[in-house]
Amino acid sequence: MAADGVVAGEKARYWQYPELPGVDLLHAHYIRKAFARHSHETFVFAAITEGVEAFHYRNDLVRAGPGQIALVNPDTSHTGHAGVPEGWTYRTLYPAAGLIQSIAADTTSLRGPVGFTSPVVDDPYAARLVVEIHRAAEEGNALAADSLLRLVTARMLRSHGGRLPVLRPRSAGARNAARARALLEERMADPPSLDRLAQELGTSPFALLRAFRESYGMPPHTWLTDARVRRARRLLDSGAAPAEAAVAVGFTDQPHLNRHFARIVGVPPGAYQRGRGVGGSR
């Protein structure tokens, strides 16, 4: 293993630039990395600079190579792994949903919940802009970083943007899935079994499993792991030590948090905290 728990030959830096609020950045080269199925509260703009990334986006397997940008909307199920033996290198932005909506309102006729209609955009110029945002942030050039972020976002919204549908649980199965999600969120540290959860909701385990997957793109246990990592991130951002965050969200110990965190975020908890300038025990 290399530093920060990354496999030898791989590198990853997950960080924040204070002058670019509401945006996380990841610069990484992965070879054997496989991201577990997960979702983000933010958008994802991943500009591929070398190799190929393959990823499941909802139910489809798609690929992105140099000059292309992988686009993922908030709360959208996806994975990630190498599409070629040599892996892939990318520079990724994770802009907050509110920031994207603000840019959309300022530059387009789109209003309300907005997002992107394609998971992969073939736009070498836009991909170069994402790279330049990273470089501006690395150089401490706040004016360039902020300006380029708004330019590339407006460009992609105009060519691939649209209103996101507001999903309301209309069927009994969808309502049960939403209730199950709320219960799992509430009891994250000590969740019920699938059978117990189904009993509480007055349905069968298989019916709940099917409805949950249809609503959220993953089964309840996978969603719970993703939700635990999300909550752990918020605790780490507040300065909690990884061991404390692990117990608080229901992982057995810190090694379990480390493994799942790296499979979803791309770096271990300690590296994540350092990249965001957060203090605390490691």
Image (cartoon, helix red, strand yellow):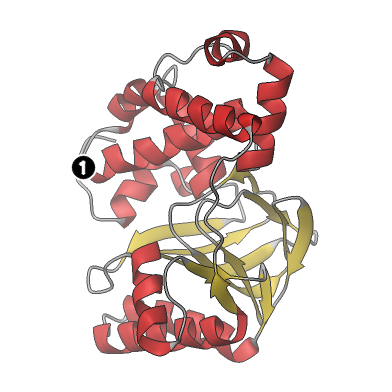
Front-most of 47 and 163?
Answer: 163
In this view, 265 is above or below 135? above
Q: What residue is rendered at 65% in x and 86% in y?
A: 123
Front-most of 2 and 282?
Answer: 282
Q: What residue is rendered at 40% in x and 72% in y?
A: 100
SS class, disc 1: loop
In this view, 44 is above or below 204? below
Q: What residue is rendered at 55% in x and 16% in y?
A: 201
In the rendered image, which quarter contains the C terminus? top left
Is 182 on the left-hand or right-hand side of 208? left
10 Å neighbourhood of mark 1: few (<14), some, or many (≥20)?
Answer: few
Please tell me in which quadrant of the rendered image residue 203 appears: top right
Q: Can the viewer see residue 91 in this picture?
A: no
Q: Which residue in the structure is indicated by mark 1?
A: 238
Is 13 on the left-hand or right-hand side of 223? left
Q: Position of residue 129 (x, y in %)?
A: 49, 86
Q: How many marks?
A: 1
Residue type at mark 1? Ser
Q: Position of residue 94 (x, y in %)?
A: 44, 63
Q: Can the viewer see residue 47 in this picture?
A: yes
Q: Position of residue 251 (x, y in %)?
A: 44, 21
Front-most of 231 and 197?
Answer: 197
In the rendered image, which quarter contains the N terminus? top right
Q: Position of residue 149 (x, y in %)?
A: 40, 81
In this view, 268 is above or below 164? above
